[in-house]
Amino acid sequence: MKTAVIYTSQTGFTKRYAEWITEKAKADIFDLKEAQKKAEDYFSSYDAVIYAGWCMAGKVVKSNWFFQKALSLKGKKLAIVAVGASPNENPEVDIAMKNLLTDEQREYIKGFYCQGGINYDKMNLPSKLGMKMFANALKKSKEAKQREMGEMIDHSYDVSDIKFIDPIIKFLEA
């Protein structure tokens, strides 16, 4: 199956997942900026197109480009991979994933989540400041789980693992 993996990454976690998917699926890989330069129908020659982006405020960054492109790729295997700092078992991940796709989009796009981490050293200043403010707000919460999450995201960490791409590979192979 001819597969394209398109990604955007700020701190490297999404790029790592895109590379792992590319390797396992024997796919072609494109940074989003490179993909945006391709001809309008370039990706129609692929059997499967996967877009991987990092999460910010419950959304996948620059996913609108993929959603627009996906309209002309219906009938192909289409997937969006959200890479975020929250552990897979965090209930907020389920909520974000439910809100990621519309009911119509779910008919032709499959959504996946892969936990990554936080790397403050590679973040741009606005993202770094926003995350630190969010972490501090969570640490002041009355709820223990919120405070725990605030402590977790207050510093850099990496919980990415190649095993989290297994459902994506199974989707491609089905």
Image (spheres, rainbow, N blue to C red):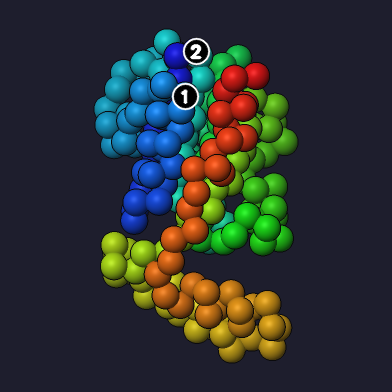
Left-right relation of 69 to 103? left
Residue 173 on image: x %, y %? 59, 20
Residue at position x 41%, y 21% in the image: 26
| Residue located 68% across and 58% down the image | 89
For label 2, the SS is loop
Which residue shows up at 29% across the image and 62% down it? 122
Residue 48 vertical placement versus 126 (above, below)? above
**Amino acid under label 2?**
Met
x%, y% of residue 133? 45, 79
**In the displayed structure image, the side of residue 147 where residue 157 appears, left or right:** left
Q: Residue at label 1?
A: 25
Q: Earlier in the sequence, mark 1 or mark 2?
A: 2
- Residue 44 lies, with reference to residue 172, above or below; the image says above
* Residue type, label 1: Ala
Mark 1 in CB contact with mark 2 (< 8 angstroms)? yes
Residue 92: image location, x then y, percent: 67, 61
Depth check: give the residue in front, 39 or 23: 23
* Category of crowding for the residue at label 1, using alpha-carbon neighbours closer than 10 angstroms: few (below 14), some (14–19), many (at least 20): some
Q: Is residue 126 above or below residue 69?
A: below
- From this viewpoint, is residue 99 visible? no
Q: Residues within 10 Å of mark 2 (few under 14, many from 20)?
A: few
Quadrant the C terminus occupies = top right
Q: Which residue is mark 2?
A: 1
- Observer-nearest of 131 and 69: 131
Place of residue 55 in the rendered image (x, y in percent of width and height, measured from the top left): 49, 54
Using the image, determine if residue 59 lies above or below residue 8. Answer: below
Snapshot quadrant of residue 137: bottom right
Residue 101 quadrant: top right
- Report whether 126 appears left or right of 25: left
Q: Secondary structure at mark 1?
A: helix
Which residue is found at the position 32% from the left and 63% from the top?
123
Marks 1/2: CA distance? 8 Å
